[in-house]
Amino acid sequence: MLRALSNFFVTFLNRWMPDSFVVAIILSLFTFVMAITVADFPVAAATQAWGDSIWDLLRFTNQIVLTLLLGHVLAHTPPVRNLLMAMAGRVASPYAAYVATTMVAFICTYISWGLGLVAGGIMARAVGESCRRNNIVIHYPLLVACAYAGFVIFHQGLTASVPLTIAESNHFLVDKIGTIPFTETAMSAWSLGIVLVTFVTLPFVMASLAPEPDACEQLPERLLNTPMEQEGETDPSLHDPDTPAARLERWRGLNFILVAAALYWLFNHFSANGALALELNVVNLIFLTAGLALSQSPIQFVGLVANAARIVGPFLIQYPLYAGIAGIMALSGLALLLVNVFVDLSSAQTLPFAAFFSAGLLNLFIPSGGGQWAVQGPIMMDAAVQLDADLALTAMAVALGDQWTNLIQPLVVIPILAIAGLHVRQIMGYMVIALAFTGLIFVSGIAVAVYL
């Protein structure tokens, strides 16, 4: 049944799913029309709100892009890359290919959402190459979908945007809700339970969607004959290897000087604030440090960063469009109308469910954990205070709704698709099934937290 259902969505979305940039434009137009017709917002005001808002997320965009870029660098350092390639080489069956790819992406996402997106793409590509060379028949689009499915718990990992934000002492809602420790949100028992259940079930659900062998699409020949990105070395012809400048560029000691300084700062930070005192800037410093430590020279690290530019570029151009959407929704009152439809029907016990579903819907228009929290967070936290609902649970319900519908939001999947060499329409049918399955897990987990 699942296979037949996934085949329907694959066929439908292969025909009708446009590029993620086109989706962003269409969502912008849809939001514009809805603000005018539903929220009774004047055309001139909607246009002004869009133009005033497109650069509002620049600081956050820079943080998120750095998380992605540094995760990409870390995944392409020789030790991490070799580990992923070695795991790919041990795959001996199609079923194992799908399960292993989902699990690797899941684990890497828990460590860092940026690492998860990149490592998932590399794992899918490496497994696809290994299977083709070893005559193991796999369906490559499903394999890539497995890599993205593992991303579904990113708001419950160590780089979770919302939990890290509200754990900061100076976050924008601190006067309303205070600070909420990471241990009460992403590291709470009920959240960790969701992570565990998803980890032990989702890979096998994804594997069950595999088509019959004669309907499988192997990794394309063009990708098999084109190696993935090199390890980051710049063109050796640019510098004479015997010059002082070239020797300095290749001296690993410069890496370790920066690593030592960063480790000193991180030691002082965690000593003063606790082992789980994580926020985006701290996480980015950790991955910068790891990338420098595992790179073989400064010039190799720079080459890895240059390779990552291809991946982060679409984020940089699309985030302003989604910031514009967020601006229209916030200034027109459209976001408030949307969320209040759920909140008005809620009690202290049902508010987390309202937060989850409203966040899932809003995320399709604002696919940024931090950006969406800036719009929805104040509304949901006001409601939680008024209804005396659990603040940490309500905030996490928003985060779960956001990560849930990211499975069908085409912006976030760009890094995996860029590495894997596929178009979003080729995997989206499988993501619909993953959306339905994980939705059941998330709702059940929230119910456990509310009623037990």
Image: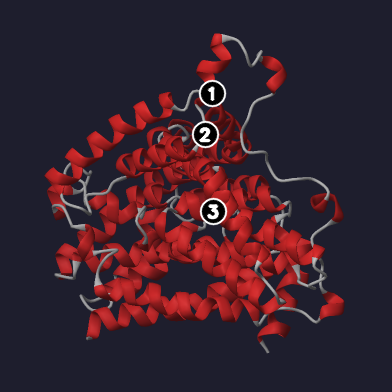
Q: Is residue 201 above or below residue 171?
A: below
**Total numbered labels placed on residues in the image:** 3
The answer to whether marks 1 and 2 mark residues whose Cβ atoms lie closer than 8 Å is yes
Q: In the rendered view, does 444 fall on the left or right side of 425?
A: left
The answer to whether marks 2 and 3 mark residues whose Cβ atoms lie closer than 8 Å is no
Q: Which of 436 and 294 is in front in this view?
A: 294
**Mark 3: which secondary structure?**
helix
**Mark 1: which secondary structure?**
loop
Rendered location of residue 57, percent (x, y):
41, 37
Kind of residue at badge 2 = Gln
Q: Is residue 239 above or below residue 286?
A: above
Q: Mark 2 points at which residue?
A: 296
Rendered location of residue 179, percent (x, y):
16, 52
Q: Is residue 389 above or below residue 331?
A: below
Image point (79%, 63%), residue name: 15
Q: In which quarter of the image is the N terminus?
A: bottom right
Color theme of the render: secondary structure
Kind of residue at badge 3 = Leu
Crowd class of label 2 (few under 14; some 14 to 19; many from 20; radius 10 Å): many
Which badge, 2 or 3, comes first in the chain's sequence?
Answer: 3
Image point (62%, 55%), residue name: 121
Q: Quadrant of residue 267?
A: top left
Image point (31%, 82%), residue name: 447
Which badge, 1 or 2, comes first in the chain's sequence?
Answer: 1
Q: Name the residue under label 1.
A: 250
Image point (41%, 61%), residue name: 110
Q: Quadrant of the C terminus?
A: bottom left
**Mark 2: which secondary structure?**
loop
